Amino acid sequence: MSVSTPAAAEAEAEAKPEKARAGQGSGPPGPRNPPGPSYMLGLDVGSSVIRCHVYDRATRICGSSSQKVEVIYPQNGWVEIDPEVLWSQFIAVIKEAVQAAGIQMDQIVGLGISTQRATFITWNKKTGNHFHNFISWQDLRATALVKSWNNSFLLKLIQSSTKILHFFTRSKRLLGASLYTFTTQQVCLRLAWILQNLNEVQKAAAEENCCFGTIDTWLLYKLTKGSEYATDFSNASTTGIFDPYQMCWSGILTSLLSIPITMLPPVKDTSHNFGSVDKEILGASIPIVALVADQQAAMFGECCFQRGDVKLTMGTGTFLDINTGTNLQQTVGGFYPLIGWKIGPEVVCLAECNAADTGTAIKWAQNLNLFTEADETEKMAKSLTDSEGVCFVPSFSGLQVPLNDPCACASFMGLKSSTNKFHLVRAILESIAFRNKQLYEMMQKEIDIPVTRVRADGGVCKNSFVMQMTSDLINEKIDRPVQIEMSCLGAAFLAGLAVGFWTDKEELKKLRETERVFEPQRKWKEYEPSMENWVKAVKRSMNWYSKI
């Protein structure tokens, strides 16, 4: 657990939100007139950490708290989170952050919640009791289902028929359908697995007594003591059962996978009045005015509002997102279209790809006592001219695009008798930069949008070795902000806009601060031999496990 001391920051003026009935699901909540300065809460339930920041109008962090997400591994490939533990931690970090800021709970004029995506739970609609733990986006229990569906005659028939129809109609929706494949990271087949294997859930769903929710939906339900049940467009678009072209749950996919559409929540705007926290929980009825998926929140926090803006998040995993404006981009290689956010009539689209193991690889090395603190790794890597031919494959959760192999194994290759922990650490950091290069190259190849700027965030972006090597490899300037935990800030920004705490995006752009801009220093040719060696190691790690 980590709690920061309060900053002696005063808000410049009181928030003046428009009047509306809180909890009615439309418009901003009514004015609260808190005593003294007003503040905004930004929360992020990430894959590794639950974090809460208290922001003033200048986006200064006046108080913060964080707790480590307690992940459960009940079987090989299964990844879960205990919902009761998560709920206790979530409430604790709010209380601790507000206390650290030295303010009262009723001075909070709104809160925004960012959450890891595609991690879900189901619960009894009548009792509110959950049927199982959260099934994490990293969970691989549906691997066999994914393979079966992707190789099925039915899916191939759908792909080929929609491809023919696209040829005649040029419909982007049909193009998307022709390229559609299932992955373990999507909710859809993990939810199908739950419905097939847990009779209690299957029975409740058949009786329309089952609620499905990603973490945002479940937290909203808990915070309002069951009076509100919803998700937002950014979270819905990551599930694999949402049609971003029609902006609704996909009737075709839910029917295909035997998922009752009645168990899915209503989908609302990202910046929206979702209701208020029940007063008994925090001692004040705080408006919940933003729900947003973590990567989309980071994109918003980075102020990547322009078409062509790119965000590189290096946290638990690496996520590369590009703002595609109002158009969804479907590609062959693995970039998937997402709804970035919806605010009133404005809908911003993103294209994204990811690598699952970034911070997890560094944490694993730390657990092996290769170093004590993560910030030591930069100096360790820089103390060597190279890794002496040692390669690391970051594949604890399989390999994502462009290789898409859930059965790949994590591995070190090229070990020698002279290899020491410094070589191992450098190889791990190099593997992160090499994966960044792979993702960026694929984006350049498949997304026909000129890049306007590249901005980085996430805990791993503090590592200047990784940042500089990535800048060299992609031959682009990379902007690292002062505040690297952008999901919290993005959630707060979206919430603040909903209640008038901040005026508009132009004001937000002025508030974002750059800490350092990394510029290319070495040519790609200098890295080419070592990356070719690393690619060879990656290929040899593929298809290692016959079954997950």
Image (cartoon, grey):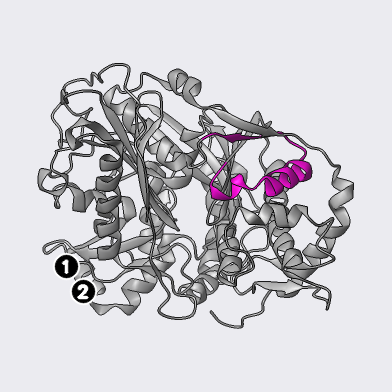
Q: Is residue 178 left or right of residue 277?
A: right
Q: Secondary structure at mark 2?
A: helix
Residue contact at pointers 1 and 2, CB within 8 angstroms:
yes
In this figure, which residue is indicated by the disc labeled 1? 207
Question: Residue 327 location, x and y as percent?
Answer: 53, 34
Q: How many marks?
A: 2
In front of the other: 264 or 90: 90
Q: Residue at x 25, y 73 (%)?
A: 202
Q: Secondary structure at mark 1?
A: loop
Crowdedness of circle 1 by 10 Å Cα count: few (<14), some, many (20+)? Answer: few
Can you tell which mark lies on residue 248?
Answer: none
Compared to 375, does 106 lie above or below? above
In this figure, which residue is indicated by the disc labeled 2? 203
- Which span of residues is magenta-colored? 457-482
Q: Residue at x 67, y 32 (%)?
A: 517
Asked whether residue 512 is drawn in magenta, I would say no
Q: Residue at x 22, y 64 (%)?
A: 123
- Amino acid residing under circle 1: Glu
Q: Is residue 151 visible?
A: yes
Compared to 199, does 285 lie above or below? above
Which quarter of the image is occupied by the N terminus?
A: bottom left
In front of the other: 27 or 12: 12
Question: Residue 342 location, x and y as percent?
Answer: 39, 34
- Amino acid residing under circle 2: Lys
